């Protein structure tokens, strides 16, 4: 039975006037007011079925685990409980629904469950690291000291991760100094000069976005360190991170540049601007926020990579400010090294460094999102205001210029 | 000005009108701009192809020595002349398969939830959360795997091997599951655990590709399905999933590419062995990238060349997977014009 069958037949006139509007018949005065109907799709019965099957599944799993079967382990409990929940829920729903509705409800619950599982898993991974790291984070020397004078047996009030932090910042600066110009130029090439070459470059870049990071490290090791004979250093690690980041940044920037409206570029060409002027004054400023986002997201990936640094930077326990000589260490590599010690304090330092690294990535990500939340050409309120002011200023300038122009010059201009 | 039109009469003496070359006058700045940007493109192309060339060049020494036995030998003793990637390659593929078979249902479920079920208010938050998860450093996932998962998944491992041990790859040797005092260490550092860690890493990547494609399913077709009386799940099965098939396969392949190349997360969890070990729940696993990270420090010249050869094999494998992924994504209907 559907809503259509229950509708009182008097509400709609059966034969509408040709071309006219069908109106509901006037409500006779004194008749009771029609109650407002709820539009929500959630019924109380659905909720009861959900809660009931959850309770039944928990109880059943408890009985199975404690009384009947030789099972244990938290994960196993969750898995079994979830499967039982799906089964019981399907059974409950089947009591008063037919085939398609049962499948719909069970699928909805299964999808919600999978999403919840993934959400819990990921939040758990992050909070596990931060919680274990909390032990080391409150010590001020953790941010201001390196591990030069701190042995593995010393407490957390000695030593810190300063050398990793500085190393990471130096390496990522080197990588960015190469990636930003080269990546943006290459992305401009892909979008402005279409042809066989740019198609080839785009294909290669797309395939390289998932280049195993250890292969990027091996490549720099084979070229920079073996073939050219340089030492392991921060600069080599920066190069390895560059090789890894470059395709990621190019691909994201290419997508952003292709989103710039063609009408803007055509307007620029129509007033006689050259291609170079159009790119510099129209395309790049329009895509600026998107380009910033793509670079920042690439940075977030590059900052957390361990294996290219492992092969190319060596390892040191002291702060090293010179990227060209002597080994340097980065935060992920420091984490990797610290947690392999058997001493709990060293492991705590490792977790603290990992938490700090993750906060750094989180910060970068937040900045990237805040800058790049809008599409090309969309302005924030303040940008819009500035644009209006600039335009007003220009109009004023034109007016003054026009007024100050000697009559003769303007006359001459008209004659020509 | 006269308004008469003069018509040019075709004469037989005039040669046939040939297409003229179109020449646009480009200024100096434009020529420089084109030169610079083409140079940038070629530089990137050169760097990317140099990776393959240099790895091959460095690997030749070892490859010439080993010949075809490089693909069939299991042990890794380059200085004794006995080395090959059979074991590590199988290990890598096993870890990637475990990761993918866990990650794909999770990724599809999450992508469907975000694009179809989630309230519109929290959708942008969920999307940036998934993207953020893709940017979490792999060493963090490795920490979680080594310090938490390793010790909490043992019960599940033992349960699976007890009840499904008759399936060959789920059996475990060296312990009796029915003995309550049996040691649990045979279940640690296994392919299964490494696979779970890698699955956590690749799920966000696969999920964001799939969500993108699902949300592009044409609104006209969705409404058509509803108009024919489909339930939400009916609509998803008949419109969203067929439309997103290319994206689902492509996202899976991208995740597979990442899973094959993952280094640190795997290295922190497994205890490397150099025999083909198909029992995924049992301790001992291996992967090409963790082999490189492990042996790289103490390597001699020849050993290094062998490691380069292993890296080359990994590189070629991920390249093939990635090319397949991007061509499948490009060829799917996603992005095609629809009259929604």
Image (tube, grey):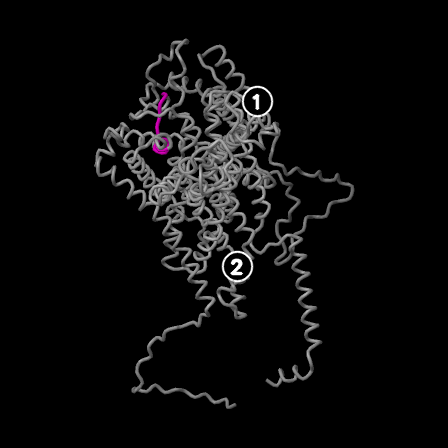
Residue A18 at x, y = what percent?
A: 61, 58
Q: Residues within 10 Å of mark 1 (few under 14, many from 20)?
A: some
The residue located at (58%, 26%) in the rendering is A134
In the picture, the disc for residue A61 is none
Residue B99 at x, y = what percent?
A: 40, 31
Residue, disc 1: A52
Magenta span includes A313? no
Note whether A277 is above or below A413 in the view shown.
above
Foreground mark, 1 or 2, reads 2
Instruction: Using residue B216 as the reference point, say whether residue A366 is left or right of it.
Output: right
Note whether B9 is above or below B240 in the view shown.
below
Dividing the picture into quadrants, the one containing residue A158 is top right
Q: Nearer the viewer, residue A123 or B333?
A: A123
Judging from the image, mark 2 belongs to the subunit labelled: A
Classify mark 1: helix, strand or loop.
Answer: helix
Q: Residues within 10 Å of mark 2 (few under 14, many from 20)?
A: many
Classify mark 2: helix, strand or loop.
Answer: helix
Instruction: Tell me how far mark 1 sits from mark 2, CA to CA.
Output: 58 Å
Residue, disc 2: A283
Instruction: Using residue A158 as the reference point, say whether residue B281 is left or right of it.
Output: left
């Amino acid at each position: 039975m559907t809503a259509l069958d229950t509708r009182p037949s008097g509400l709609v006139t059966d034969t509408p006037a040709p071309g006219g509007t069908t109106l509901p018949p006037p409500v006779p005065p004194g008749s009771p007011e029609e109650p407002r109907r709820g539009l929500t799709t959630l019924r109380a019965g659905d909720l009861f079925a959900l809660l009931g099957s959850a309770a039944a599944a928990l109880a059943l799993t408890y009985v199975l685990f404690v009384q009947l079967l030789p099972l244990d382990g938290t994960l196993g409990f969750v898995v079994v409980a979830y499967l039982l929940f799906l089964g019981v829920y399907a059974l409950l729903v089947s009591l008063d629904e037919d085939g398609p509705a049962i499948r719909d409800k069970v699928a909805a619950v299964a999808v919600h469950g999978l999403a919840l599982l993934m959400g819990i898993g990921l939040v758990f991974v992050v909070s596990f690291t931060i919680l274990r790291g909390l032990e080391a984070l409150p010590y001020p020397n953790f941010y201001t000291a390196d591990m030069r004078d701190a042995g593995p047996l010393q407490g957390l009030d000695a030593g810190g991760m300063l050398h990793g932090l500085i190393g990471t910042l130096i390496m990522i600066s080197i990588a960015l100094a190469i990636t930003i110009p080269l990546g943006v130029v290459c992305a401009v090439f892909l979008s402005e000069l279409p042809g066989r070459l740019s198609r080839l470059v785009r294909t290669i870049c797309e395939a390289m976005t998932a280049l195993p990071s250890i292969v990027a490290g091996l490549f720099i090791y084979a070229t920079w360190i073996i073939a050219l004979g340089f030492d392991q250093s921060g600069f080599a690690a920066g190069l390895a991170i560059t090789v890894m980041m470059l395709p990621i940044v190019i691909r994201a920037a290419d997508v952003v540049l292709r989103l710039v409206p063609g009408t803007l570029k055509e307007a620029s060409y129509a007033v006689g601007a050259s291609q170079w002027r159009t790119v510099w004054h129209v395309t790049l400023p329009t895509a600026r926020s998107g380009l910033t986002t793509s670079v920042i997201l690439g940075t977030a990936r590059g900052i957390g990579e361990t294996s290219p640094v492992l092969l190319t930077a060596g390892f040191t326990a002291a702060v090293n400010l010179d990227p060209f000589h002597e080994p340097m260490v980065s935060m992920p590599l420091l984490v990797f090294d610290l947690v392999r010690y058997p001493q709990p304090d060293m492991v705590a330092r490792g977790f603290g460094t990992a938490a700090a690294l993750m906060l750094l990535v989180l910060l970068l990500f937040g900045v990237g999102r805040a800058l790049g939340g809008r599409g090309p050409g969309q302005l924030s309120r303040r940008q819009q205001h500035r644009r209006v002011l600039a335009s007003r200023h220009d109009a004023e300038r034109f007016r003054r210029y026009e007024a100050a122009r000697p009559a003769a010059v303007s006359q001459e201009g008209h004659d020509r | 000005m006269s308004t008469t039109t003069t018509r040019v009469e075709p004469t037989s003496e005039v040669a046939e009108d040939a297409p003229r070359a179109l020449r646009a006058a480009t200024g100096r700045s434009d020529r420089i701009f084109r030169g610079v940007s083409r140079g940038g493109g070629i530089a990137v192309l050169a760097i990317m192809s140099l990776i393959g060339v240099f790895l091959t060049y460095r690997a030749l020494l070892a490859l010439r020595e080993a010949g075809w036995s490089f693909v069939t030998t299991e042990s890794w003793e380059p200085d004794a002349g006995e080395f090959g990637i059979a074991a590590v390659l199988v290990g890598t593929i096993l870890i990637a398969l475990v990761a993918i078979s866990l990650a794909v249902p999770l990724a599809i479920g999450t992508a469907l939830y975000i694009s179809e079920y989630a309230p519109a208010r929290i959708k942008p938050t969920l999307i940036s959360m998934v993207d953020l998860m893709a940017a979490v450093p792999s060493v963090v996932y490795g920490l979680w795997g080594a310090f938490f998962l390793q010790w909490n998944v043992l019960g599940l491992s033992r349960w699976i091997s007890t009840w499904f041990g008759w399936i060959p790859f789920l059996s475990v040797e060296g312990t009796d599951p029915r003995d309550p005092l049996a040691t649990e260490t045979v279940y640690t550092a296994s392919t299964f655990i490494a696979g779970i860690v890698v699955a956590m890493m690749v799920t966000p990547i696969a999920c964001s590709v799939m969500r993108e494609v699902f949300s592009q399913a044409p609104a006209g077709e969705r409404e058509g399905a509803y108009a024919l009386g489909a339930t939400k799940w009916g609509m998803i099965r008949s419109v969203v999933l067929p439309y997103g098939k290319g994206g689902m396969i492509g996202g899976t392949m991208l995740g597979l590419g990442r899973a094959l190349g993952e280094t640190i997360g795997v290295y922190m969890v497994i205890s490397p062995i150099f025999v083909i070990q198909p029992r995924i729940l049992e301790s001992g696993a291996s992967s090409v990238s963790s082999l490189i990270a492990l042996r790289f420090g103490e390597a001699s010249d020849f050993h290094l060349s062998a490691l380069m050869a292993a890296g080359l094999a990994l590189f070629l494998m991920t390249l093939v997977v990635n090319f397949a992924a991007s061509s499948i994504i490009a060829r799917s209907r996603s992005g095609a014009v629809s009259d929604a």
